[in-house]
Image (spheres, grey):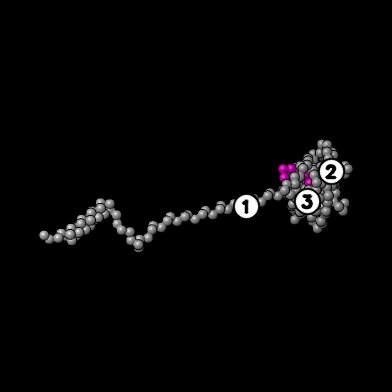
Amino acid sequence: MKRSGPLLTLLAGLLVGLFMLSLNATTGEKPTSASVKPSPSTKASPSTAPAQTSAPPSPSPSRTPVPEGVYTGRTDDDSSAVAITVRDDKAIAYVCDGHNIESWLQGDVKNDGSLRLTGKGGASLDGKVKGTKEIRGTANVGSGSYAFTIGKAKKSSGLYRANSTVAGAKIEGGWIVLPDGEQVGILKRDGKPSPAPRIDPETGAVTVDGQQLTARPVTP
């Protein structure tokens, strides 16, 4: 009787091999290769840069309000009178020596309380509010330069102007009524200057060459 041991051992090995092949085909598993690289991890998004904050706006220039009204007075050398009337950030000025030098000027009142006014013939006036009742500055009229310090006018003083025609002549008059009641003005007849006659500050009434006219307060 022949021995069947080796044959049985071989048969058993074949059965085990077939079983393993069948198991792999069923599960679909494949051997892992050492060369396979793991999938790269998702890259972290770069951190968002902090938002730039805009610089705060520059502060507006400090406002030095100029109280509305009329400011009158004489120049430092006492040669002329100056009047400035202020309203709604606008200003009109009159500089007059009462004989033959005069100038009307106008311009804006700036946020810092300063004034830069201009007139005919290159005339100019630069002023600055001091406190609440005073304006200091310099007026340049003709070939002269006149420093001044003028105060806020009371009811008895002010700035007046008249324009009319008398006996066929064109009349232009300007008056500054100072706090002490003094009046400084020039009246032009067809452009020829002469000292202005007195007016009534209460009514503005003035008589020119026998005819009564009305000088009116000046406002911007």
User: Which residue corresponds to the image point at 80% horizontal and 52% vertical from the top-left?
Assistant: 137
Q: Quadrant of residue 160?
A: top right
Q: Please say if 118 is above or below 152.
A: below
Ranked by sequence position, the earlier of labels 1 and 3 is: 1
Q: Position of residue 51 (x, y in %)?
A: 56, 52
- For label 2, count other residues whose C-alpha is less than 10 Å away and answer few (under 14), some (14-19) or many (20+): many
User: Which residue corresponds to the image point at 18% horizontal and 58% vertical from the top-left?
Assistant: 8
Give the extent of the magenta segment: 84-90
Q: Position of residue 169 (x, y in %)?
A: 78, 45
- For label 3, count other residues whose C-alpha is less than 10 Å away and answer few (under 14), some (14-19) or many (20+): many
Q: Position of residue 220 (x, y in %)?
A: 73, 44
Q: Which mark is residue 55?
A: 1
Residue 118 versus residue 153: which sits nearer the camera? Answer: 153
Residue 85 versus residue 163: which sits nearer the camera? Answer: 85
User: Where's the N terminus, which quadrant?
Assistant: bottom left
**Residue on which the image places disc 3:** 127
The amino acid on which the numbered mark 2 sits, given as a three-letter code, is Val
Distance in Å between CA atoms under marks 2 and 1: 52 Å
Ranked by sequence position, the earlier of labels 3 and 2 is: 3
Q: Is residue 137 left or right of residue 180?
A: left
Q: Nearer the viewer, mark 2 or mark 1?
A: 1
Q: Is 92 part of what is drawn in magenta?
A: no
Q: Are marks 3 and 2 in contact (CB under 8 Å)?
A: no
**Residue on which the image places disc 2:** 177
